[in-house]
Amino acid sequence: MIESNLVTGYRLLGHTDKVKCLAFHPKGLSLASGSRDKTVRIWDIKKRSSIIFEGHKDDGWFPSVNCVAFHPHKNLVASGSQEKLIKLWSLET
């Protein structure tokens, strides 16, 4: 079943290497993406803009952010990387 309120056809440009993972915010207003460029981006779907979190390092082989997840009740995003590290990012402004 396809819901009529889904956003379709948008291109969110900004990562400089392959996107490895995506996660929608529980309320559906934001999208987190992780990339081989070692960044996490939090996208405002309506504005098609993003904030960037940097801090994952190059492990020498295939550097990348491999997973991202929103906390269901707090303004946090977790990311896991090839460097065997989990980072928590605050979305509080």
Image (tube, grey):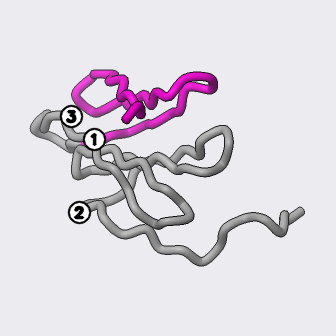
Residue type at tag 2: Thr
Res. 16 mark:
2
For image coordinates 27% across by 33% down, the residue present is 82
The quadrant holding residue 26 is top right
**Residue 3 image offset from top left, x and y in percent:** 84, 63
Bounds of the magenta segment? 64-93
Secondary structure, mark 2, is loop
Tell me the tag on residue 93.
none
Instruction: Name the amino acid type tagged 1.
Output: Phe
Asked which secondary structure carries label 3, the reply is loop
Rendered image quadrant of residue 92: top left
Question: Which residue is denoted by mark 3 in the rendering?
Answer: 56
- The quadrant of the rendering that contains the C terminus is top left
Q: Position of residue 50 (x, y in %)?
A: 37, 56
Task: Mark 1: give few (<14), some (14-19) or many (20+) Cα within 10 Å.
Answer: some
Residue pictured at 38% horizontal, 39% vertical: 66
**Residue 22 on the magenta span:** no
Q: Residue 20 at x, y = what percent?
A: 40, 50
Mark 3 surroundings: few (<14), some (14-19) or many (≥20) residues within 10 A: many
Q: Quadrant of the N terminus?
A: bottom right
Q: Label 1, label 2: how many angstroms apart (C-alpha)?
A: 14 Å
Q: Which kind of residue does numbered mark 3 sit on?
A: His
Read off the residue under disc 1. Answer: 53
Q: Is residue 44 left or right of residue 8?
A: left
Q: Is residue 90 magenta?
A: yes
Q: What residue is shown at x 29% (from left), y 60% (from top)?
A: 15
